[in-house]
Each structure stands twice: as structure tokens, then as C-alpha cells.
Image: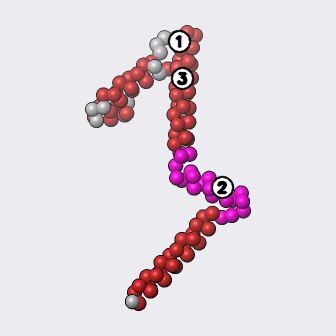
Amino acid sequence: MREANTAYEQGDEDRLKAILVEYESSPESVKGEGPGAELVRVIRKIAQVNRRLAEIDGEVATLRESEQFQLKAKVDQAAIEGRNLLQEMAEALDAQIAASQERLECLSER
């Protein structure tokens, strides 16, 4: 309901339509009792779960493409090789900082 209220406040007609369609196809919207109604509820619940699993698959794929995941993969691979990639990166940065400081001192002396 909160999502519908937010969509209404923002004037997002497409989102309101999507919320309505989602509700109409939800297990909760099935009226009646008995095995037939219960079967429809179960089928709709399975469809909801399948849609959510597809969304999760998409989210995981997006995360796997992120820079953070790529860094994690490199750190994990380095660990398998017996290396500490983050320490190596920190040492490289320290060396770059030291070199930059030396250059700055040289330029300051001129």
C-alpha cells in the first residue's frame, strides 16, 4: 500500500498500473475456498517466487559486473596464489606517495 501511495503522490501512472496488475495476479486476490481456489493460490505463489528469483539473478549479474566484485575476485585469486593483493596495492600507493613527495620537495627547492 505504501508503494501505491508513493506512486500516486509522484503521479507515476505506469507504476500504479503495475501495482494493480501485480495485486490482481497475487495469491491474495483469489476469492473462494476449496481445492480449486487453493490450487490457484499455490500456482500464483509459485509464479511470484519464480519472478523474484529472476529478479535476484539479474541483481547478482549486476553485482558481478561491479568494480567491487572485480576487486574481490582479484583479491581472492591473489590469496589462492599466496599473495595479499590489498597489501601490495597499499605498498604501491605508499611508493607513489613517497615519489610524489620527493618531486614536490625538489620543485620547492628551485
Magenta residues, start to end: 63-84
Give the secondary structure at mark 3: helix
- How far apart are labels 3 and 1 at the CA level? 15 Å
Density class for disc 2 (Cα within 10 Å; few <14, some 14-19, many ≥20) is some
Q: Mark 3 or 2 closer to N-term?
A: 3
Q: Position of residue 35 (x, y in %)?
A: 58, 10
Give the secondary structure at mark 2: helix
Identify residue type, mark 2: Asp
Q: Position of residue 85 (x, y in %)?
A: 63, 63
Q: Position of residue 102 (x, y in %)?
A: 48, 83
The answer to whether residue 44 is above or below residue 102 is above
Q: Which residue is mark 2?
A: 76
Decide whether the magenta segment is chiefly helix, strand or loop.
helix
Q: Which residue is mark 1?
A: 37
Density class for disc 1 (Cα within 10 Å; few <14, some 14-19, many ≥20) is some
CB atoms of marks 3 and 1 within 8 Å: no
Give the secondary structure at mark 1: helix
Q: Is residue 83 magenta?
A: yes
Q: Nearer the viewer, mark 1 or mark 2?
A: 2
CB atoms of marks 1 and 2 within 8 Å: no
Q: What is the image's colouring? A: secondary structure
Q: Quadrant of residue 104 in the image?
A: bottom left
- How far apart are labels 1 and 2 at the CA level? 50 Å
Q: Position of residue 48 (x, y in %)?
A: 52, 25
Residue at x 56% of width, y 27% of height: 50
Q: Mark 3 or 1 closer to N-term?
A: 1
Identify the disc placed on residue 47.
3
